[in-house]
Amino acid sequence: MEDVKLIAKKRVLEGTGNARRLRNDGTLPGVVYGDEKEPVSVTVDMHDFEQILHHHVSESLLLEIELEGEGDISVLIKDVQHHPVTSDLMHVDLQRVSANKPIHVDVPIALIGESEGVKAGGTLDHVMHSIGVECLPKDLVEAFEVNVSGLKIGDSLSVADMNLGDKYKLLVDEDAIIASVTGPKSESDEDDAGTGEPEVIKEKKAE
């Protein structure tokens, strides 16, 4: 399904109260910034924006929007603020992008395959869920797929193992762990965890 085209209308009124009224009316407040231009406060249709997010894995997306007074521009969804309790959309930051200028973005990491260690009874621990990279807009992907099929119990995969190539400049430590496989707990470990009883230290008898 093709994404709907967002129309960003300029807004003048600021403040928490006005933002709440906008959301109640079905519009999402936001800001368009970057490319050495003054930030512009905008609103976009709440439903249209929700539909775009619904059809993608990542919230870090490149979009063509129609900005009131400027026409069509390319933007990166840089930040989406959600309500901490309801997860409702609260605000969106849209960064202007140029085709020949690199962008900094967090790309989700998707683990694929079933590791040998898990088949042997181990547990896969997905440690790092996204990775910061610098790349040109045309090279942005929704997620980096990492195959964990070869991981045995005790093995781990680091950022360096992803081999992203020259298109992407890493913004994180190459030694950072993405995923690891730990062995199954022994019966004694499970028994100790299950009892939850503190160790009793007996009072030493006086000599």
Image: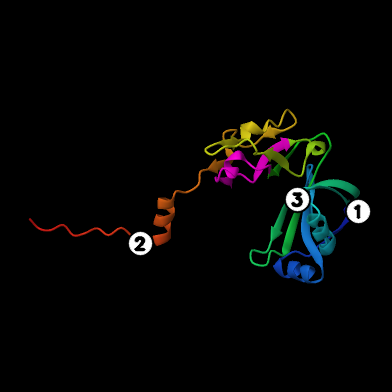
Q: Nearer the viewer, residue 80 or 206?
A: 206
**Closer to the N terminus: mark 3 or mark 2?**
3
Single out the mark in the foreground, 2 or 1. 2
| Residue 187 sits above or below residue 50 on the image | above
Q: Quadrant of the C terminus?
A: bottom left
In the image: residue 144, left or right of residue 154? right
Q: Is residue 115 magenta?
A: yes
Q: Amino acid at mark 1?
A: Gly
> Residue at point 44% right, 54% down?
190
User: SS at mark 3?
Assistant: loop
User: SS at mark 2?
Assistant: loop
User: SS at mark 1?
Assistant: loop
Does the image show residue 74?
Answer: yes
> Residue at point 62% right, 31% down?
160
- The residue that mark 2 highlights is 197
- The residue that mark 3 highlights is 57
**Closer to the N terminus: mark 1 or mark 3?**
3
Q: Residue most toward the left?
A: 207
Query: Are the residues at dot 2 and dot 1 in contact (C-beta closer than 8 Å)?
Result: no
Q: Amino acid at mark 2?
A: Glu
> Residue at point 73% right, 43% down?
143
Single out the mark in the foreground, 1 or 3. 3
Give the magenta range.
Answer: 112-134
**Closer to the N terminus: mark 2 or mark 1?**
1
Q: Amino acid at mark 3?
A: Val
Q: Position of residue 2 (x, y in %)?
A: 89, 52
